[in-house]
Image (spheres, rainbow, N blue to C red):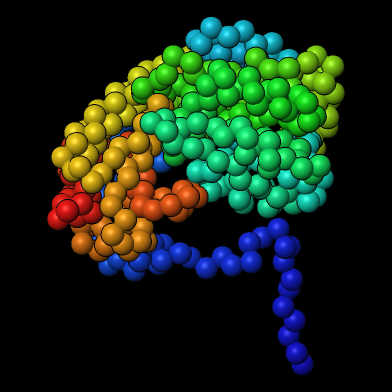
Amino acid sequence: MSSTVSKFSNRLPPNRAPNALSVRLAGLEKGADYIDLTESNPTRAGFDYPDGLLRDLASPRALTYDPHPFGLIAAREAVAADHQRRGMRVDPGRIVLTASTSEAYSWLFKLLCNPGDHVLVPAPSYPLFEHLTRLDGVDAVPYALDYHTRWEVDILRVRRAMTDRTRAVLAVSPNNPTGSYLKEGELLLLDELCSQRGVALVVDEVFADYGLYVPPDYVTDAALRTRALSFTLGGLSKSVGLPQVKLGWIVVGGEQAERARALAALELIADSYLSVSTPVQVAAPDLLAQGGVIRAGIMLRLRENLRALDACVQQYRSCQLLACEGGWYAVVRVPATRSEEEIVLDLLDRERILVHPGYFFDFPREAYLVVSLLPAPEVFADAAARMLHLTAGSL
């Protein structure tokens, strides 16, 4: 009697074997300490959260289930009010609540794309795009961010990457990991190009509140500024430092007729899932109201660690801290005397320091190290100094 092997969807990656860094990390002796300069979870980074912050998650109001495809109006009004911190007014009727930014992407791919269609994604950028697009049967096509003292969108490459199958251009502002915001001129050109081609623009702004060295021509709230059908993404994970409190949102923009058509279709998609829990929607107004205290603490940490990293890098002529305009990460160019994989494995083996290699984010060449600015300052400064000494100290 022969056994059969179940066949899984080709939306899954064909090779899911762990990479060398994951294997090495798993091979550390149980309980072995290491400094995690890839930390992306603020709840593990030693920040102080206000007492009673999560109290409303247990509110008796959450015992009544009254679903709305776009989310409770009180929660959407709270998101709209929060936008006013940046001087932007948004109609709550243009806001769609989701369980996360990842879910927001999935709903937008369902809205905009047929299987096999293309979306353009920035490179370097967060590798999650590869999985999110593939799981929805969509092809991710990269376009370049070029570095010339600051990161810039290569509009010509965006134009060349477009085909008849292109349905959306994705941007992240500030980008993860480059820390670069969209600039006014870039948004203007992307809007014009998308309008001409009938392509949507999706701008992920989850890190928008964390400006470090913000250029004067940066923009936020892209969906409120475009003629093309556009979508801005946000969420509590970053804006309030609460990744475990699952609430994201989509702001829908563009010309009124097209925007109305998109909202009508999104209503069907959202109503098919109803994934956003009632407790988090009930708690949203208070969570957003208290978010400023949490953001302030994170901002102080980011700035202190970025200054410490810059001071370390200044000691090595062979290294460069790339311009970081915002977000939680920084990129350091180090001598390419070895491959990035060899460098990060050596750092883990010899110094017990974990960093991301640039190739994780599709940097076009070596050698770049990507580090989180979230760890405690005294830990971060020591680890940064040892990281640079090991990678460039003998040069």
Q: Is residue 312 above or below residue 362?
A: above
Residue 44: % across, % down: 35, 40
Looking at the rendered image, the quarter that the N terminus falls into is: bottom right
Q: Residue at x 75, y 90 (%)?
A: 2
Identify the residue shown where x is 42% and y is 18%: 215
Q: Is residue 364 left or right of residue 12?
A: left
Asked if residue 214 shows in the view, the reply is: yes
Residue 68: x, y in percent?
Answer: 76, 24
- Asked if one can make out residue 51 in the rendered structure from this viewpoint, the answer is no
Front-most of residues 236 and 374: 374
Q: Can you say whether 365 is above or below 198 in the image?
A: below
Q: Position of residue 353 (x, y in %)?
A: 26, 53
Quarter of the image where one finds residue 72? top right
Quadrant of residue 348 within the rendered picture: bottom left
Residue drawn at x 71%, y 36% is 168
Question: Is 112 left or right of 104, judged from the image as shown?
Answer: right
Residue 169 is situated, as x and y percent measured from the top left of the image, at: 67, 35
Query: In this rendering, is residue 256 above or below 54?
Result: above
Q: Who's the residue at 80% across and 50% down the image?
A: 115
Please tell me in which quadrant of the rendered image residue 81 appears. top right
Outermost residue on the bottom side: it is: 1
Relative depth, front residue between 243 and 13: 13
